[in-house]
Image (cartoon, rainbow, N blue to C red):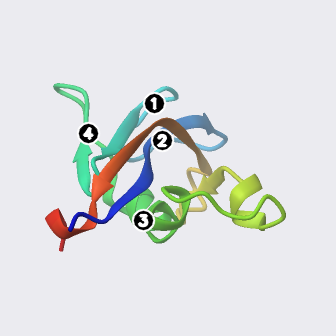
Amino acid sequence: MSRLFGLYDLRVTVVAIEGRSVCGMQVGDYFELTESSKLSLPPGKHFCIYALGAVLPLLAAKQRQLDEDDWLERDTLVTCPDPEERLIMRIERIARRTLDSDELT
């Protein structure tokens, strides 16, 4: 018996750098999270592990449809913890896919 459920694919994009970029990232840099757990970057690009660490705890929730009154459903911006950079990222849903929970861990 399959157990189908829906998840969103996400894109996390750098939308502003209000300080100085010591990690070498630029506005427009991004990564995508697809198929529940596959993280991908454009060829030749990188994403700072500290910025990634700031956004990671939110991704599982943003993959799911939440109540419209939940703050996590409405909020999309996350900041890197480095105060010198003040790098701001946006989490956006780019597609909805149907998955079978029996095929996932």
Q: CA distance from mark 1 to mark 2?
A: 7 Å
Q: Please state which of the two labelled residues, at mark 1 or mark 2, is closer to the viewer.
A: 1
Camera-nearest label, 1 or 3: 3
Nearer the observer: mark 3 or 4; the answer is 3
Q: Position of residue 77 (x, y in %)?
A: 66, 50
Image quadrant in which you'd find residue 29: top left
Q: Give the mark nearest the N terminus, 1 or 4.
A: 1
Q: Label 1 sits on what residue type?
A: Gln
* Secondary element at tag 1: loop
Is label 2 in contact with label 3 (beta carbons under 8 Å)?
Answer: no
Which amino acid, by three-letter code, is at mark 2?
Ser
Near mark 3 (Cα within 10 A), the count class, few <14, some 14-19 or many ≥20, is few
Residue at x-position 31% and y-position 44% = 34
The residue at which mark 1 appears reads as: 26
Residue 15 in the figure: left or right of residue 100: right
Residue 58, above or below 45:
below
Would you name the residue on which mark 2 appears? 21
Looking at the image, which is closer to me, 64 or 101?
101
Q: Residues within 10 Å of mark 4 (few under 14, many from 20)?
A: some
Q: Amino acid at mark 4?
A: His
In space, the residues marked 1 and 4 are separated at their CA atoms by: 10 Å
The crowding category of the residue bearing disc 2, from other C-alpha atoms within 10 Å (few below 14, some 14 to 19, many at least 20), is some
Residue 40 in the image, given as x and y percentages of width and height: 23, 40
Which residue type carries mark 3?
Answer: Leu
Q: Which residue is mark 3?
A: 56
* Gap between marks 2 and 3 measured at Cα: 20 Å
Between the residue at mark 3 and the residue at mark 4, the CA separation in whole angstroms equals 16 Å
Identify which residue is drawn at 77% across, 67% down: 70
Query: Are discs 1 and 2 less than 8 Å apart at CB?
Result: yes
Report the disc number at residue 46: 4
**Where in the figure is residue 25, as x and y percent of width and height?**
40, 37
